[in-house]
Image (tube, helix red, strand yellow):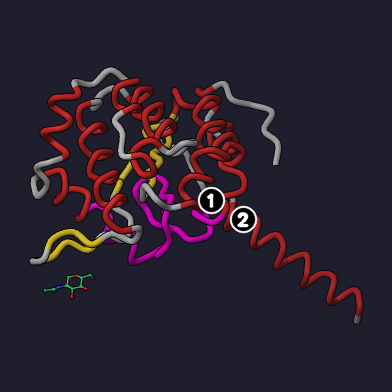
Amino acid sequence: MAAKHLVWAAACFMLSLTAVSALQAVNGRIKLTIGTASGCTDTMRFVQNQLTEAYSLYGQFLDVEFVPWGRTVWNSTGFHCQFLENDCWANRLHRCVLDRLKGNQDAQVHYMTCEFSSPYPAFAQGTYICAQAVGVNLIDIDHCVNNPGDALDTAAQSAAVVPMQAINFVPYIMFNDVPDIPLHDSAFSRLASMICFALSEDPSTGITSCTI
Ligand SMILES: *[C@@H]1O[C@H](CO)[C@@H](O)[C@H](O)[C@H]1NC(C)=O
């Protein structure tokens, strides 16, 4: 009887491991989409504790996309953000700066890392310090931030719909454009390891020796 239970326990454990290790590289690359909100402490924690390490180790194999939208509602009375006015303003700033950094992923990640690290310059202090640090034109950025309602907003709004419905968490973490709750959950505690294992299955990446 006890042995039978053990077998079942082992089978369940294997199944859950299989589900969690389902991340796969596509032609040696992984697309990582992160739905963020500027005032969200879980986003801050994810960027600091997971993204920074994973990107420094495997950034060359990643296509990173940030969607600074969170749970924003945009209707006839304007933008309504989970962490109120500052969140709306900072999320819009993030969209503006990321747009101006298109094609320079290292700078995009560097910029978002700055915004999600203490003292949280855009959200908590209302400053352009991180934008300035990454070298964008502040006059252009100021104009962008103060003229919401354009294609940057519609793009972020529509990008967030499917993953937010499926995952319903900020930040949402999505791999290769497919929302998957177990992968999202696992990214919170072991992003770098997941990426390592997925890359190691493709010998062309040269990645080996991954640890759980
Ligand atoms: C707009 O969205 C906000 C936040 O969800 C809500 O409180 C408000 O009633 C909405 N207004 C309209 C006109 O739909």
Count how many numbered circles sit on residues in the image.
2
Residue at image position (50%, 52%) is 42
Does the residue tagged 1 have its C-beta within 8 Å of any atom of ligand 1?
A: no
Apparent side of residue 25 relative to residue 9 in the rendered image (left or right): left
Classify residue 144 as left or right of residue 132. Answer: left
Q: Quadrant of residue 108?
A: top left
Quarter of image, res 53: top right
Q: Which residue is mark 1?
A: 22
Identity of the amino acid at label 2? Thr
Q: Are marks 2 and 1 in contact (CB under 8 Å)?
A: yes
- Considering depth in this image, is 65 or 101 the residue closer to the camera? 101
Disc 1 element: loop
Dot 2 alpha-carbon crowd within 10 angstroms: few under 14, some 14 to 19, many 20 or more: few
Q: Position of residue 118 (x, y in %)?
A: 49, 36
Mark 2 element type: helix
Residue bearing the label numbered 2? 18
Q: Nearer the viewer, residue 103 or 120?
A: 120
Q: Is 52 situated above or below 146?
A: above
In the image, residue 179 lies in the stretch drawn in magenta: yes
Image quadrant, ligand 1: bottom left
Q: Quadrant of the C terminus?
A: top right
Q: Is residue 35 visible?
A: no
Q: Callout 1, which amino acid?
A: Ala
Question: Can residue 49 be seen at all in this image of the molecule?
Answer: yes
Which residue appears farthest toward the top when viewing the image? 135
The residue located at (44%, 32%) in the rendering is: 113
- Taking depth in this image into account, of 155 and 88 the one nearest to the observer is 88
Q: Residues within 10 Å of mark 1 (few under 14, many from 20)?
A: some
Locate residue 5, reporting x and y percent: 83, 76
Q: Which residues are magenta?
A: 158-185
Q: Is residue 88 a member of the stretch shown in magenta?
A: no
Q: CA distance from mark 2 to mark 1?
A: 6 Å
